[in-house]
Structures are given as C-alpha cells and as structure tokens.
Image: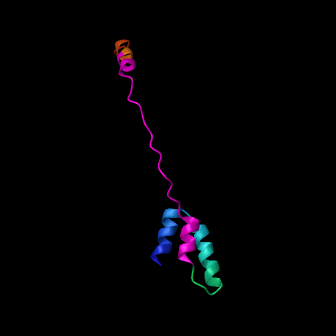
Amino acid sequence: MVALLDIAANGNCVDALALRIEAALDRGKLPNVAKLKSEFLPTVRSRVDVTIPPPDFAGYNHLLANAQVL
C-alpha cells in the first residue's frame, strides 16, 4: 500500500507505524489507512502573515563610516 509508505515518510513515524500495522495484521485485519493518516501525519496549520520591517540603512552607513580596512 503506497499510502502507508507515504505516511511513514511524511509522518516521520516508521517504527510506530510498523507496530500499528503489525497489530492490525495480527488481528487478521488490514490497517485503516484513513485512521493512520489522521494519527501520524502532521496537520496543516493556518499560516500567520508576518511583516518584516525593512532594515535601517542609516545604521549600516554608520557602521561602514567607522569601519577599519584590514
């Protein structure tokens, strides 16, 4: 099942996922892919807009004016 490989890769949960799959198979059942996805894959979080102010170039000019040439 390709979906299980996707969960293992993207969920960074190979060992834990293997135990859950093995337990399902030991009970004579196939693993519930939807349930495993909801348990192991990261959820999509809303993104927050971040405003980054432009740098203060006057500060850079001050540093350059006082810089020593090596």
Is the image coloured rainbow, by chain, by secondary structure, or in one colour? rainbow
Between 32 and 49, the one lying in front of the other is 49
x and y percent of residue 21 in the render?
59, 77
Q: Give the range drawn in magenta.
A: 32-61
Residue 33 placed where, x, y %? 53, 75
Residue 12 location (% of width, % of height): 53, 62
- Looking at the image, which residue sits at the far bottom? 28
Identify which residue is drawn at 57% across, 79% down.
31
Residue at image location 61% in from the left, 68% down from the top: 16
Q: In this view, does 36 lie above or below 48?
A: below
* Snapshot quadrant of residue 58: top left
Residue at the spot 35% in from the left edge and 17% down from the top edge: 61
Locate residue 50: give its quadrant: top left
Would you say residue 69 sits in the magenta stretch? Answer: no
Residue 7 position within the rendered picture, expressed as x and y whole percent measured from the top left: 51, 68
Instruction: Using the image as rendered, state which of residue 15 and residue 24 is in the foreground.
Output: 24
Number of dots carrying numbers: 0
- Specify whether residue 54 is painted magenta: yes
Residue 69 vertical position relative to residue 4 in the rendered view, above or below: above
The quadrant the C terminus occupies is: top left
